[in-house]
């Protein structure tokens, strides 16, 4: 595990445990910390020990300072979400830079001084899906991109349990979409967004892309060919092929990216809403999630006081008419809690609730996300399901013939 991966896990889990402790959920905090300490003891890796030492030092410093106390006891749902999204985006950016440097050394035929962060495999949904299929059909684990398999399974699990909280709290593409849309609002203040008659067909595109992804994973490759594919040169270099797509884009890619950037400036989170196949799969799974945004009409200013309030709907990045519904079942809901934060304090008519109406606090949602996306990969690593076993020398040789590598 690289230092940036270990630091993200150590800091994320320690902060989640401290938040739970500060909000009186002490058993949850102790269970989280206990599991982290046990996993670090078993793994016994220098990067993890360093991450834990740093987390303890930061926690101690935060505990003493007034500023630190504010980040534990006075943080609201929106600040917590933004903290989570920005921190993970920064972590991914550092991992991407390290990965870029690693590839540069391989391309020069030199041994890279820094290892390859396995978390980059999270961007290989097809490799992850084929790895999962291989594990289920043959019992053999993918030796080259096990992290792709783990991350795909965990992201889909978040959809099933926590709705599309991955989109609202974690995904750096969603964050980039928010910033692009803000920029669009400044540059084109008079734009009117996407008309409703066009919005629905556009939303279906991501389901078509998700179907294509499922087809590629489940149908396109015959069962007999799967073990061979998982050992193939193309599969070994799937991450580099993906990186090449962004680092050395062709004219078609540049045109598509430009349209995407303009679309994101025009429509909030256009990529997430219209194109992301991950979002489509999570959206479908989220229909089964026990968590939903619930509005209490007797508290809502619309109904109880007859006021024309629609603050929740205006805050919603998914364009859901929250103020007109009792329980939000939409596949677009990201459990981002922006509607809850926007609801006036005197009303407090909105909450994320379980099927039995029990409210789920932002700290609990954050802790569940952190457990799924940070603690479980650490546990996966203990079982040899994270680190790629590909020999760097083989990758170095394959780098020289990258353009000739194909799927067949
Ligand atoms: S309904 Fe609320 S939680 Fe769901 S996407 Fe809209 S603002 Fe976020
Ligand atoms: S913001 Fe709150 S009070 Fe206003 S419409 Fe939404 S739920 Fe009702």
Image (cartoon, grey):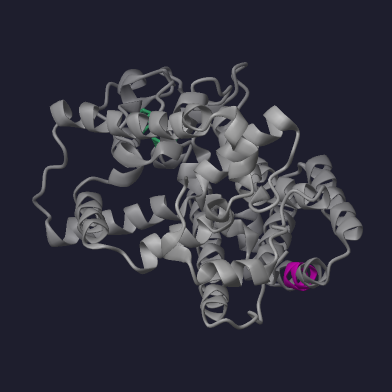
- In the image, which residues are magenta? 54-60
Residue 117 visible in this rendered orientation of the protein: yes
Residue drawn 13% across the image and 33% down it = 195
From the top left corner, tell me how far across and down residue 338 is, in percent. 42, 42
Residue 344 visible in this rendered orientation of the protein: no
From the top left corner, tell me how far across and down residue 250 is, in percent. 27, 62
Q: Count the numbered circles shown.
A: 0
Residue drawn 61% across the image and 57% down it = 119
Residue drawn 45% across the image and 39% down it = 278
Rendered view: 48 above or below 214:
below
Rendered view: 377 above or below 251:
above
From the top left corner, tell me how far across and down residue 144 is, in percent. 66, 53
Q: Any magenta on residue 244? A: no
Seen in the image, is 187 located left or right of residue 269? left
Residue 296: quadrant of the picture: top left
Residue located farthest toward the left when viewing the structure as drawn: 190
Residue 356: quadrant of the picture: top right
State the predominant SS element of the stretch in magenta. helix
* Closest to the observer, 348 or 288: 288
Seen in the image, is 259 located left or right of residue 37? left
Residue drawn 66% across the image and 72% down it = 393
* Closest to the observer, 397 or 170: 397
Rendered view: 243 above or below 129:
below
What is the quadrant of the N terminus in the image? bottom right
Seen in the image, is 82 located left or right of residue 390? left
- Answer with the quadrant where ligand 1 appears in the image: top left
Rendered view: 314 above or below 82:
above
From the top left corner, tell me how far across and down residue 256 is, in percent. 23, 53
């Amino acid at each position: 595990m690289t230092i940036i991966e270990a630091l993200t896990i150590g800091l994320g889990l320690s902060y989640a445990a401290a938040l739970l402790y500060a909000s009186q959920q002490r058993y949850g905090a102790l269970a989280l910390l206990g599991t982290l300490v046990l996993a670090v003891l078993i793994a016994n890796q220098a990067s993890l020990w360093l991450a834990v030492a740093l987390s303890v030092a930061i926690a101690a410093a935060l505990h003493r300072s007034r500023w630190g106390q504010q980040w534990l006891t006075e943080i609201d749902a929106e600040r917590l979400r933004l903290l989570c999204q920005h921190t993970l985006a920064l972590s991914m950016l550092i991992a991407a830079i390290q990965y870029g440097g690693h590839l540069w050394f391989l391309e020069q035929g030199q041994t890279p001084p820094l290892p390859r962060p396995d978390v980059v495999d999270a961007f290989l949904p097809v490799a992850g899906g084929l790895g999962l299929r291989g594990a289920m059909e043959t019992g053999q684990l993918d030796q080259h991109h096990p992290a792709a398999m783990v991350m795909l399974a965990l992201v889909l699990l978040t959809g099933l349990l926590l709705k599309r909280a991955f989109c609202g709290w974690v995904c750096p593409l969603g964050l980039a979409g928010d910033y692009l849309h803000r920029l669009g609002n400044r540059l084109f203040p008079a734009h009117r967004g996407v008309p409703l008659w066009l919005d629905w067909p556009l939303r279906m595109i991501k389901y078509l892309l998700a179907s294509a992804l499922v087809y590629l994973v489940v149908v396109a490759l015959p069962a007999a060919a799967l073990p061979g594919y998982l050992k193939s040169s193309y599969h070994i270099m799937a991450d580099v092929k993906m990186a090449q797509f962004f680092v050395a884009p062709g004219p078609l890619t540049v045109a598509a990216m430009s349209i995407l950037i303009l679309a994101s400036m025009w429509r909030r989170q256009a990529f997430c809403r219209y194109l992301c196949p991950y979002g489509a799969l999570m959206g479908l799974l989220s229909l089964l999630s026990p968590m939903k945004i619930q509005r209490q009409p007797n508290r809502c200013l619309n109904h109880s006081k007859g006021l024309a309030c629609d603050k929740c709907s205006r805050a919603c990045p998914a364009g859901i008419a929250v103020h007109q519904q009792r329980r939000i079942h939409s596949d677009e809901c990201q459990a981002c809690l922006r509607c809850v934060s926007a609801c006036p304090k005197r009303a407090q008519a909105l909450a994320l609730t379980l099927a039995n109406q029990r409210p789920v606090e932002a700290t609990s949602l954050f802790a569940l996300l952190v457990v799924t996306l940070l603690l479980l990969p650490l546990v996966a690593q203990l079982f040899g399901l994270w680190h790629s076993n590909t020999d760097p020398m083989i990758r170095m040789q394959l780098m020289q013939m990258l353009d000739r590598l194909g799927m067949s």
